[in-house]
Structure formats: structure tokens, C-alpha cells
Amino acid sequence: MNSDHLVLSITLMTPYSSVHIYVLIDSSASVSAFIDTDFAQLHRLKLYELKQPCSLTVVDRCLITSKAITHHVISKTKISTHQKDLSMFMITLGHYSVMLSIKWL
């Protein structure tokens, strides 16, 4: 965990278990949440295909052209006593398996 980043500990409910993870809070994200594609597949989260693929623009307003976002997952999440179903777009993330926007909080 990097002390330069705002992180939060959450529990993500998967079909077969509960996974305790640290998530990155991104103050500039315009979308509520992202989940790492490999993490979602590893934990057998149900994938939902988007009706229309979408692109992703990063902080410096550059368009990421490697892949369009084509799927999302919905998973129950728990922070302390607060539970919520969370829809997360699937992308390739770095160190954190999930990234949440400030808007989600």
C-alpha cells in the first residue's frame, strides 16, 4: 500500500467467498468504479456486456486506445457496516484491484 495514495479497505463479495482488499480512491474519476479484469475473472465475478463499448480518458485527458471497455461487473461491497451493490467497469489496473471515485463515497 502506497502512503501517497488515498486508499480504503473494503470487503468484496464474490460468488464463492468474501475478499478483503484495499481500493484506490481517485478524486478525478468521472465514473464511479473500475475493477481489474484479471481480478474479476480470478474471483469468478459475473461479467455483463455493455450495450455500447466505451473508451477511457485518463487524468491528463489522453484517450487510452489499447482497448475499449466492453464489460462491467456488479458485486456487493461492504465498508464497515455500509453495504452496497457496486457496478464496476472492467479495465487493466496496476497495483490496486479496484478503483473508486470520490463520487462513490
Image: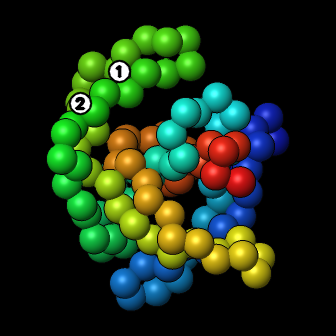
Q: Nearer the viewer, residue 19 or 54?
A: 54
- Which colouring convention does the figure follow? rainbow
Residue 80 pos. (x, y %): 77, 76
Q: Is residue 61 visible?
A: yes
Name the residue located 65 percent from the left edge and 59 percent from the top edge.
Answer: 22
Name the residue located 60 percent from the left edge and 48 percent from the top edge.
Answer: 100
The kind of residue tagged 2 is Lys
Q: Secondary structure at mark 1?
A: strand
What label sits on residue 38 in the rendered view?
Answer: none
Q: CA distance from mark 2 to mark 1?
A: 7 Å
The number of discs equals: 2
The answer to whether marks 2 and 1 mark residues whose Cβ atoms lie closer than 8 Å is yes
Residue 97 pos. (x, y %): 50, 54
Of all residues, the one furthest to the bottom in this rendering is 16
Mark 1 packing: few (<14 Cα in 10 Å), some, or many (20+)? few
* Vertical relation: 29 (above or below) 93: above
Q: Quadrant of the C terminus?
A: bottom right
Q: Is residue 20 visible?
A: no
Name the residue located 71 percent from the left edge and 64 percent from the top edge.
Answer: 9
Residue 13 pos. (x, y %): 50, 79
Q: Is residue 50 left or right of residue 75?
A: left
Name the residue located 51 percent from the left edge and 49 percent from the top edge.
Answer: 33
Question: In this figure, which residue is indicated by the disc labeled 1?
Answer: 64
The kind of residue tagged 1 is Ile
Question: In this figure, which residue is indicated by the disc labeled 2?
Answer: 67
Of all residues, the one furthest to the front in this rendering is 51
Q: Is residue 20 left or right of residue 8?
A: left
